[in-house]
Image (spheres, helix red, strand yellow):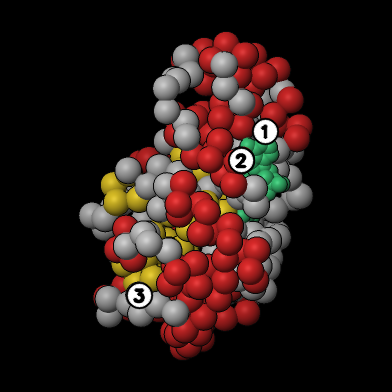
Amino acid sequence: MLALSDGTLLPDIGFGTYPLKGAEGTGAVLSALEIGYRLIDTAVNYGNEDAVGRAIAQTDVARDDIVVTTKLPGRDHGYDETLASFDRSAAALGLDTVDLYLIHWPNPSVGKFVETWRAMVALQQQGRVRSIGVSNFTEEFLLRIADATGVMPSVNQVELHPFFPQEQLRAFHEEHGIVTEAWSPLGKAAPVKEAEPVASAARAHGVSAAQVILRWHQQIGSVPIPKSANPDRQRENFELGGFTLTHDQVAAISSLGRADGRLFGGDPNTHEEM
Ligand SMILES: NC(=O)c1ccc[n+]([C@@H]2O[C@H](COP(=O)([O-])OP(=O)(O)OC[C@H]3O[C@@H](n4cnc5c(N)ncnc54)[C@H](OP(=O)(O)O)[C@@H]3O)[C@@H](O)[C@H]2O)c1
């Protein structure tokens, strides 16, 4: 568990749900909860808050033990729009409160992320949201919302994998008490898994390449949220006990990072999602 700046705790690994929908989505979240995941990541734009909500209603795991995350879409930026969007998300999830609520993308050309953040702060003050954070925010955008409100996000969920390790942003997060969550933590699997420092560490520890990458995240202080539709791979990704990467192995995997290592050009200064 990691301590958030608001005093609550966040599991050190989560379950990503995009693009799982409908009965498949509910089944995947139910099996993830059974395996032991307690942090579930959804978003309005994944079209699966209802499927996630059904799993939370059906599981034997206590509601209080699950950290449900959802994200506000770009088309709902703005103060009143955020409050209304939250109500829709809570209804779709079938929940009164959400544990972690994030602004999905800053969408700087829209220019409304500061007032959106003010509404997130209000939702937290009203007790409707336990923790508030952002996703895909740069240092500049983080400072702008913190300067305007006096509240720094507790979490910033960003693209992070061995090809794009986000060293500078992670250092900034550490300095400002922000926990880093990693989306596409496996880099969507294939090429990252085959990279030699990952493959050699997997051989050395007798584990899979995916397990090496997820352990690398945890050792650099990043919370990975891998997605898998397959219960065996969900378990493989969750059960990371029993091995620790050496300092050299962590450094070799981090050295795979490159300036153009993003998966699809998702630079938050230019990439926008509504
Ligand atoms: N905030 C944002 O802007 C943002 C953007 C993108 C994603 N996300 C979140 O991050 C989550 C994870 O990212 P992602 O789904 O893009 O990428 P990912 O978790 O890095 O990779 C998922 C892919 O890897 C495969 N996989 C999973 N475990 C594996 C294993 N042990 N061995 C081999 N292959 C494995 C999955 O296939 P199978 O399902 O067949 O196992 C799937 O094709 C998303 O689900 C979403 O919740 C957030």
Query: How many angstroms separate mark 2 from mark 3 (CA)?
Result: 30 Å
Check mark 2 vs ligand 1: CB closer than 8 Å? yes or no: yes
Amino acid type of disc 2?
A: Arg
Q: Is residue 99 visible?
A: yes
Q: Is residue 144 visible?
A: no
Instruction: Say which mark, if any, is on residue 163.
Output: 1
Q: Quadrant of the C terminus?
A: bottom right
Determine the residue positioned at 57% across, 81% down.
76
Q: Residue 10, how many percent across, how many down?
A: 35, 50
Front residue of 202/105: it is 202
Amino acid type of disc 3?
A: Thr
Q: Residue 175, how many percent across, how many down?
A: 35, 41
- How busy is the neighbourhood of tag 2: few (under 14 within 10 Å), some, or many (20 plus)? some
Q: Nearer the viewer, mark 1 or mark 2?
A: 2
Q: Residue 134, how many percent across, how many down?
A: 48, 61
Determine the residue positioned at 61% across, 64% down.
25
| Callout 1 touching callout 2 (CB < 8 Å) | no
Front residue of 1/176: it is 1
Query: How many angstroms separate mark 3 from mark 1 (CA)?
Result: 36 Å
Disc 2: which residue? 233
Q: SS at mark 2?
A: helix
Q: SS at mark 1?
A: loop
Amino acid type of disc 1?
A: Phe
Disc 3: which residue? 97
Q: Residue 218, how many percent across, how many down?
A: 45, 34
Determine the residue positioned at 42% across, 47% down.
36
Front residue of 196/51: it is 51
Q: Nearer the viewer, mark 3 or mark 1?
A: 3
Residue 79 located left or right of residue 261: left
